[in-house]
Amino acid sequence: MPACFVKGCPHRTGQKLKYPNVTLHPFPKNFNMIKNWVQQTGQPLDNIDQLSQKILEGKKENSYRMCSCHFTIDCYMTRGSRTVLKPTAVPTVFSSNNQPPLYTVTSFKERLQIATNTEGASTSSIVVRVANRLHNVHTQTDFRILQHDQYCNTEHWFNQRTVATQTDPPDNIPGIVTKPDQNCLPCIRDSVPDHSRSNLTPQKRSLNKGCDSKPKRQILETDVPELFLPSPIPPKDPEVLGLSVGNTEAVTKQFTDPAYDPQKETLAIKSSYQSHHKFVDVLLTRDYTLERKFIVYESCLDKLLLLIRCQHHSTEPCCASIADIKKIMSGSQILVLLRCQNKHLSLHWVSQPVEGNTSVGNIQMAASILFSGASFKKVEEMYSLFGIQAISRAAYCRYQRAYLFPAIRYQWELEQQNLKKGLRGKAVILAGGGRFDKPCHKFYTYTLIDSFTQQIVNFKINEVGSGKSSVDIGKETFQMCLDEVLNMNIDVHVVATNSNVAICKLMKTKYPQINHQLDIQDVGKRLSKRLLLASRKANCSLLADWIGPITNHLWWCTKTCNYNPNLLVEKWKSLMYHIADVHTFPQNKEYPKCEHKKHRRKNIAWLTEQHKAHQTLQSIVNAPELLNDIRKLEKFCHTGSLEVYRRKIFKFFPRLVSYRLDSVYARTALAALAHNRIVNENQSTFQCSSKSTVQLGKQWHKIAFPKKTIGWHSKPIYKEANDDHLTDIMRNTFRMLQGECHHG
């Protein structure tokens, strides 16, 4: 019977009566997840990879399991009427009794003569995060380590015990970020054959016993790696965090044992620091994008700075208090210069990371304003009311041109490469539409969208010049946009556009191999405008009640014509019979009668052939220009997704604001990237039955009352938009700032 994988855990299968609330979960089917589960237990294992592979091979029998007591409540989700474990769940709850005992430092021979002074060996603390567990890790910082000391405790923690924890974490554990203290030196223990047993339990020590009373090995200054340097804080200063560092030269003179071999000690030190060097890259390559930022009041910052003692030690340590605090502002960054009472420059501190001569926080503030579609004027006013130091408008524009716009262009080019790979070898149907920017109409933007995936494939921006009509600008921009798509070796079969005369002529002459279709949405809008104007004529007011049904009839004809233009035209012409209450027309070959059921309503305002409105409507329905356009609707192509894209554009183009060409391109690219992320988002579903009586898994809807249609409607609610592309752009911005990425 399978038991829980964690040693010391009493749970196993067949104990449902004894432990009714405990479930034994099988290990996941992924090798990396299995390895992560095993490492999280912290058990001493010789070969984790071999054991993980053995667990993966035994998945058919599920011989290895882990009970639910080792998972937190947020590791579970509701699926139907059952509560199951999330696919990404990781065990984090383990009792300290399950951990192996701490390896204490032992010495087989007294090599060193211990000084009889009573200066305390100091410790410093860092925080290691392992999943959901936080441990306070204490690291030895004094070169006279593990000496007997009765006055090591500098904090007034009465009736408590000091706990020391092993600082060498297991290798390659996901979720662990270890930050070694630059000013401290970890304790060195004797070599242990099994290095995998490094996740150790705390060893309890008595009060005021900071170190072991037995003399231990000393460390040569030349054997210490350069990463761990002695702290500049002088000794015997309990006001400076209770830390002290001794003089290494005095320690090296105390090596009197002739049997002592420095080379062997060096090997022991290198083996002990081997795991620490593996985490140095994690520390140095910090992700500025995901790092948390805090708002700090100036008064609170001054209180913190006044606690610092002078760290000047050119001749002898200076422990004077701070007498002067000088702050230099640079946008959102603050530079602090501290001087002590002895006129020493005590501290030079910057609130933000600096790459080159540019503050990372200033760049990220400018990027956040641009990527969120906010107006700089409103954000500046908000910061001013809050009292937050922020960048100026000139700096905002400078950062945009130097870093943000190139990063956006680079991300859009990567998006186009991915779209090109996805469309390669497929017959593509494109739908296009253009728009002028407002309010100056300085630029015209034409966009092509894939009708199948509803994703933006390409867009082009053309500057409006003197002597150019809107028709010519639309044709020129469309040609540039389509030529660029064809140069990507994309097999374009159909292109749907509006009824621009110049574009229709261009498609017939330059691109005869491509089937040119018209946008049914554009044709329907033009038809509605004609009917509205006709309804305002004398004795034609009844046409106003038929505008909606006529446009719906056009959409129905296009959708049900089965790609047959002749059937499409006959269905459209049958409108004149139907509107006169005649529902059979045998003269038509492909559509001889209406497909709807018999009407039961008696108050329908039919338009007979003798009515003037009927004659006016007939001149519109049978117009040769409209019939030619309807023949180009048999593929049922429309630009409904472009309307969603245009709404997203309004987020990045605030009204009544004029932009330059580079800014228009960047903001249009941001809208295209955001549209491609949300276009295929699924509709939200109910996940918690306690908050609603609706069945679990059913889709969310909301009730709306649009003014245009005048009536209550049910609208779907979609999941929250995925904006991970903005994080990628932010990272590319920092790479350009660091000189790792160049883009014109």
Image (spheres, grey):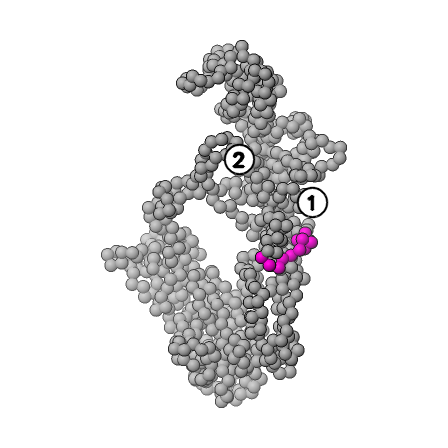
Residue 345: x and y, percent?
Answer: 65, 75
Q: Residues within 10 Å of mark 1 (few under 14, many from 20)?
A: few
Corner quadrant of residue 234 = bottom right
Residue 672 appears in the rendering: no
Which residue bears the numbered disc 2? Answer: 452
Residue 617: x and y, percent?
Answer: 56, 17
Residue 271: x and y, percent?
Answer: 50, 73
Q: In the rendered structure, does residue 689 fall within the stretch colored magenta?
A: no
As drawn, 510 above or below 437? above
Tell me whether circle 1 and circle 2 mark residues in contact (CB < 8 Å).
no
Q: Amino acid at mark 1?
A: Arg
Q: In the rendered structure, does residue 396 fall within the stretch colored magenta?
A: yes
Who comes first in sequence, dot 1 or dot 2?
2
Residue 565 is labelled as: none
Q: Nearer the viewer, mark 1 or mark 2?
A: 1
Which residues lie in the magenta part?
386-397
Q: Residue at x 61, y 75 (%)?
A: 322
As drawn, 218 above or below 570? below
Q: Residue at x 68, y 37 (%)?
A: 441
Tag 1, which secondary structure? Answer: loop
Q: Residues within 10 Å of mark 2 (few under 14, many from 20)?
A: few
Q: Amino acid at mark 2?
A: Phe
Residue 383: x and y, percent?
Answer: 60, 55
Which residue bears the numbered disc 1? Answer: 660
Q: Cα distance, mark 1 to mark 2?
A: 33 Å
